[in-house]
Image (spheres, grey):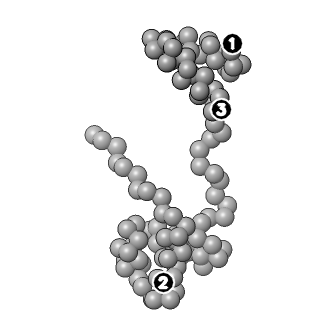
Amino acid sequence: TAAAAMAPHTTNEMRERMVAWHSELGKSDTEIAALANCSERTVREVLRLHRTFGVVRNPFAQPRGGRRSLTTGDLNFISSLLAANPCLYLDELQDRLATDRDID
């Protein structure tokens, strides 16, 4: 079975519009969801955040993802290695990163 595609993130601009549609035009959650092309749950969450905190994004949410392990320089190094030696095995690549770039 194919994995379900995740919906695109709702921009801050669209979230602000949701609030305006609700407060200024009196649109329902269902109408706003149709206009914003998102779920009613998203609409309710945005309106709740605005009502509770006065903002359209959760002010306590942590940034998504973890700290990057490789720098741009490291990625350029890997690209150069693979361009010069396309048959390089992963363990050899890791060895070169450890010795040349001090990455474990």
Q: Residue at x 59, y 27 (%)?
A: 76
Return the x and y of residue 46 as percentages of the image width and height.
53, 71
Mark 1 or mark 2: which comes first in sequence? 2
**Circle 3 or circle 2, nearest the eye:** 3
In the rendered image, is residue 86 in sight? Answer: yes
Q: Are marks 1 and 2 in contact (CB under 8 Å)?
A: no
Left or right: 58 as drawn, with respect to 84: right
**Comes first in the chain, label 3 or label 2:** 2
The residue positioned farthest toward the right in the image shown: 102
The residue labelled by disc 2 is 22
State the CA–CA distance, disc 1 to disc 3.
16 Å
Comes first in the chain, label 1 or label 3? 3
Residue position marked by numbered label 3 in the rendering? 71
What kind of residue is marked 3? Thr
User: Label 1 belongs to which residue?
Assistant: 99
The image quadrant that residue 51 belongs to is: bottom right
- Name the image quarter holding the N terminus: top left
